[in-house]
């Protein structure tokens, strides 16, 4: 937010969960590529920020081997953000040595660029918002970021001169909350998530951010 506070669906849901469990809520910014170390060290108690639970790390290790995941509560995909003046209409049209792509370091967006647009120059950003701002400033040609984030801000306010050229044909990303292995906090949060589905809390927060079509409404389907 403009006042420096942290806002968003995940943070609102986390704050509600902490309140329901009688725990103190504290938003802690971290470097995404250091998230597992931050969790193991105790600097944070869970990773609750668009954490893609399906798939594996770069070295092939399944993510579920590193953390205990909550229920999968939201589905996301990657998308491409460019300046509105850019005439490209598909991701393939950007595949040139003359362009610079940017994504958050260690993110699904970075993986997608590395796998699908090898001719461009890849720049790593500390956050997805930093990546979007690089495109806004004209220092990068395009960014690959979460559609859920981009769709909530692109084309309005400070980002009025940006557009989403397409949703990538990328694998659905199933968001879940990551906890230290064996931590009973995971089970307590799962109970709260189930209650939030039943009493409408999750849908209410999702509607606030225009994400009601992205939430998973039956936790038994994906586990």
Image: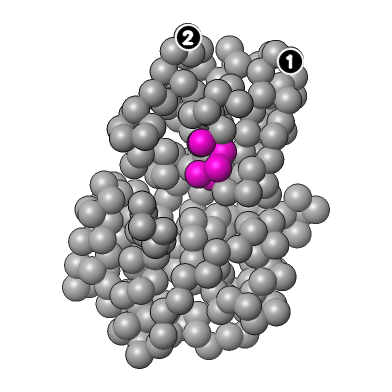
Distance from label 1 to label 2 (Cα)? 17 Å
Magenta segment includes 100 = no
- Magenta residues (range): 128-133
Q: In terms of secondary structure, what is the magenta stretch mainly? A: helix
Closer to the camera in the image, 13 or 132: 132
Residue found farthest to the right? 59
Q: Quadrant of residue 84?
A: top left
Residue 96 image offset from top left, x and y in percent: 69, 14
* Residue lying at 49% horizontally and 23% vertically, measured from the top left: 82
| Colouring scheme, one of rainbow, by chain, secondary structure, one colour | one colour
The residue located at (23%, 54%) in the rendering is 208
Label drawn at residue 174: none
- Location of residue 148 in the rendering, given as x and y in whole percent from the top left corner: 40, 44
Q: Is residue 11 above or below residue 184?
A: above
Residue under pointer 1: 97
Q: Earlier in the sequence, mark 1 or mark 2?
A: 2
**Residue 44 in view here:** yes
User: For the N terminus, which image quadrant?
Assistant: bottom left
Q: Is residue 37 left or right of residue 209?
A: right
Q: Secondary structure at mark 1?
A: loop
Q: Where is mark 2, residue-wise?
A: 87
Residue at image coords 48%, 13%:
86
Helix, strand or loop at disc 2? loop
């Amino acid at each position: 937010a403009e006042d420096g506070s942290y806002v968003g669906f995940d943070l609102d849901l986390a704050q509600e969960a902490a309140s329901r469990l009688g725990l103190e809520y504290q938003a802690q910014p971290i470097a995404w590529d250091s998230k597992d170390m931050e969790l193991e060290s105790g600097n944070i108690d869970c990773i609750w920020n668009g954490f893609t639970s399906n798939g594996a790390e770069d070295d092939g290790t399944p993510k579920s081997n590193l953390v205990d995941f909550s229920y999968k509560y939201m589905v996301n995909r990657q998308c491409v953000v460019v300046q509105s003046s850019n005439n490209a209409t598909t991701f393939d049209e950007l595949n040139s040595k003359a362009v610079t792509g940017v994504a958050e370091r260690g993110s699904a967006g970075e993986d997608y660029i590395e796998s699908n647009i090898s001719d461009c120059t890849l720049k790593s950003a500390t956050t997805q918002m930093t990546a979007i701002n690089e495109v806004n400033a004209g220092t990068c040609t395009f960014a690959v970021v979460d559609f859920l984030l981009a769709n909530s801000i692109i084309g309005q306010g400070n980002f009025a001169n940006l557009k989403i050229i397409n949703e990538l044909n990328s694998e659905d990303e199933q968001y879940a909350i990551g906890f230290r292995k064996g931590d009973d906090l995971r089970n307590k949060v799962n109970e709260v998530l189930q209650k939030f589905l039943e009493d409408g809390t999750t849908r209410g927060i999702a509607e606030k951010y225009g994400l009601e079509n992205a939430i998973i409404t039956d936790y038994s389907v994906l586990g």
